[in-house]
Amino acid sequence: MNPDIQDVAIVGGGQAALATGYHLQNSGLRFSILEQSGRVGNSWRSRWDSLQLFTPARYSALPGLPFPAPGGSYPAKDQFADYLESYAQRFRLPVRTDLHVESVRRAGGQFEVRTSEGTLHARTVVAAPGHTTIPRIPALAEKLDPGITQLHSSRYHGPGALPAGDVVVVGAGTSGAQIALELAGARPAGTVYLAGSPTAHIPDAVFRFAGPVYWRLVNSLLTLDTKPGRKAAAGFHDRGSPLIQVSMRDVERAGVVRLPRFTGVADGQPMFNGGDASADAGNRDRSRDRSWAGTAKPHNVRTIIWATGYRPEFDWIEDLPRDAYGWPATVRGAVPELPGLYFVGMPFQYALTSGLIGGMGRDAAHVVAQLRAPKG
């Protein structure tokens, strides 16, 4: 065995990478986990101060180590960051921090992994960089009045850093709703708006009273091996993830004003167009999406927070095949066109839970089993 060649290089040091390392630990294979920050869990520590996980603690653990909190509680982001760090220490995973991966290319039956500290060689690469990579901000944002403060949710840390005045949070997913709720509680002198069409809401009672049954449903039934799962996967990237822990009722009770989708800019101000249905939003079903007549244009907007998610960015992997949404084209994590390249942690990689903390362990175990299987 060539001592200069690793068996497996895992790119990324988050939950997907650590779950993969756990399953590799007793495989007899030489591997390294390459983390670009200086400390395991830093991607979580850098997010907004009040962030909580979207799933309860009992479904937010990696294989081999339960999360140290009451099962029905929603851990804070720093709690989870500390959990990841302790996980790596507990299982003595070979994490190399402060190591930025610049490119990955297949050459001569192995992979060249160019890093900030030189080139590594590996027979297999597992890419687990997470699916929150490049912030997605509408191109029209460039046309907004320069006096409006704009920031993506990845750069939001709390209400205190924002200028006085009205705030529009664009994006009615769980992150956008949580941020709008926090702002509404901290900015009594200004109006907080939430723009966008929310996805379906999973009531807290589902996790509280039927959590195990519900988890088995989404984890076992909604997979690529079942007809309902394939149907759910087909439109997954168009719909987005369901609202968890927070609902539109919560948002409106806090005094947040709902707006339709951001659709344009006029005279430097954001425009929100809701279609041609009833304008009386207050009389509509508040738990579901609804339409507005005409175009809404809030006045005195001082800040826009783009809770609009992320876009995939995998240009650092040479010749990577993509699907129609820009995500890696894989078969349960394997890339047939680049033998030896795998992914863990991608949205709906195998199941609806593949992008959730509690669902990554199964995908990691499957990928490790594939890369260990005899070739030929």
Image (cartoon, rainbow, N blue to C red):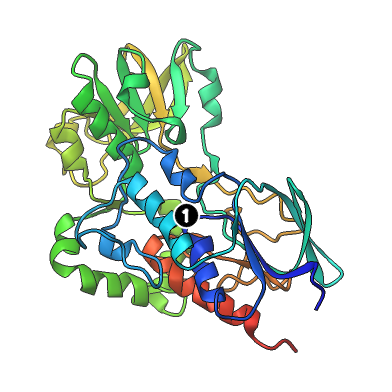
Q: Going by the image, does 311 lie left or right of 120?
A: left
Quadrant in the picture for residue 253:
top left
Front-most of residues 357 and 319 = 357
Q: Amino acid at mark 1?
A: His
Quadrant in the picture for residue 4:
bottom right
Front-most of residues 278 and 121 = 121
Q: Position of residue 177 (x, y in %)?
A: 28, 39
Q: Is residue 173 visible?
A: no
Q: Residue at x 32, y 45 (%)?
A: 174
Crowd rating for badge 1 (residues with CA inside 10 Å; few <14, some 14–19, many 20+): few
Q: Secondary structure at mark 1?
A: helix
Q: Name above or below for residue 193 compared with residue 348.
A: above
Q: Position of residue 143 (x, y in %)?
A: 54, 18
Q: Position of residue 13 (x, y in %)?
A: 54, 55
Q: Residue at x 46, y 26 (%)?
A: 151
- Dot 1 corresponds to which residue? 237
Q: Name above or below for residue 224 compared with residue 121.
A: below
Q: Is residue 22 visible?
A: yes
Q: Position of residue 8 (x, y in %)?
A: 67, 69
Which quarter of the rendered picture does the C terminus lie within?
A: bottom right
Q: Going by the image, does 58 lie left or right of 7?
A: left
Q: Residue at x 18, y 55 (%)?
A: 203
Front-most of residues 28 and 293 = 28
